[in-house]
Image (spheres, rainbow, N blue to C red):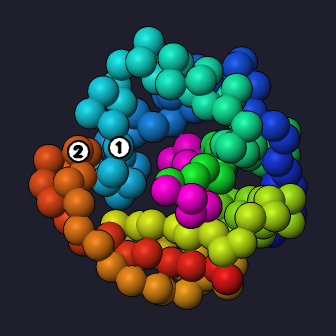
Amino acid sequence: MPNQQVTLRPTQDADLDALFEFQLNEEAAYLAAFMPQNHTDPVAYRAKYCRFLRDPTIHMQTILVDGVLAGSIAKFEIEGDAEITYWLDRSFWGRGVATAALRHFLLIEPARPVFGRVAFDNFGSQKVLTNCGFRKAGTARGFASARQAEVAEFIYQLP
């Protein structure tokens, strides 16, 4: 859909119920791989993300497509490194929304370098990162709770 308008706005508490529902999609959870064990618990989800909304080191934005809530994107820090994460409702996959959202986000998020981590077989997210200028910088292995297995992940970096 080339005429769709992808915009970002600060995430609000009112967005959390829809964002929780998006991440319950089994295919999406499998591809994301590295999720909290309790990702299906709405009380735990809301508590965690309400805390994130108040954390000044986390920059959370809601993705809108033609004014419809479509997902989220955020910058957070791990051991001093800036990392990005994004999540789209399954109905918006394959339409260029994640790439457009990440491009917009990188214009308003000044942290550099910024890293993105993606499961080795999440080809869609790998394409989004490379389309936005990220380059593969390494690999790691970790336990993926959504798969109940250790999997490889690729680490991408935007200098």
Label 1 is placed on what type of residue? Met
Query: Residue under circle 2?
Result: 145
Q: CA distance from mark 1 to mark 2?
A: 6 Å
Asked if residue 77 shows in the view, the reply is yes
Residue 80 shown in magenta: yes
Residue 35 is labelled as: 1
- Identified at 25% across, 45% down, the residue is 146
Q: Which residues are magenta?
A: 79-91
- Identified at 61% across, 21% down, the residue is 50
Quadrant of the rendered structure where residue 150 is? bottom left
First reached walking from the N terminus: tag 1 or tag 2 = 1
Which corner quadrant holds the C terminus? bottom right
SS at circle 2: loop
Residue 27 shown in magenta: no
Residue 127 x, y percent position in the rendering:
54, 78
Q: Is residue 30 above or below residue 122?
A: above
Residue 25 is labelled as: none
Asked if residue 128 shows in the view, the reply is no
Given contact means CB atoms under 8 Å apart, are the residues at marks 1 and 2 in contact? yes
Quadrant of the rendered structure where residue 94 is? bottom right
Residue 3 x, y percent position in the rendering:
86, 63
Q: Nearer the viewer, residue 81 or 123?
A: 81
SS at circle 1: loop
Q: Main secondary structure of the magenta part?
A: strand
- Identified at 65% across, 53% down, the residue is 75
Label 2 is placed on what type of residue? Ser
Which corner quadrant holds the N terminus? bottom right
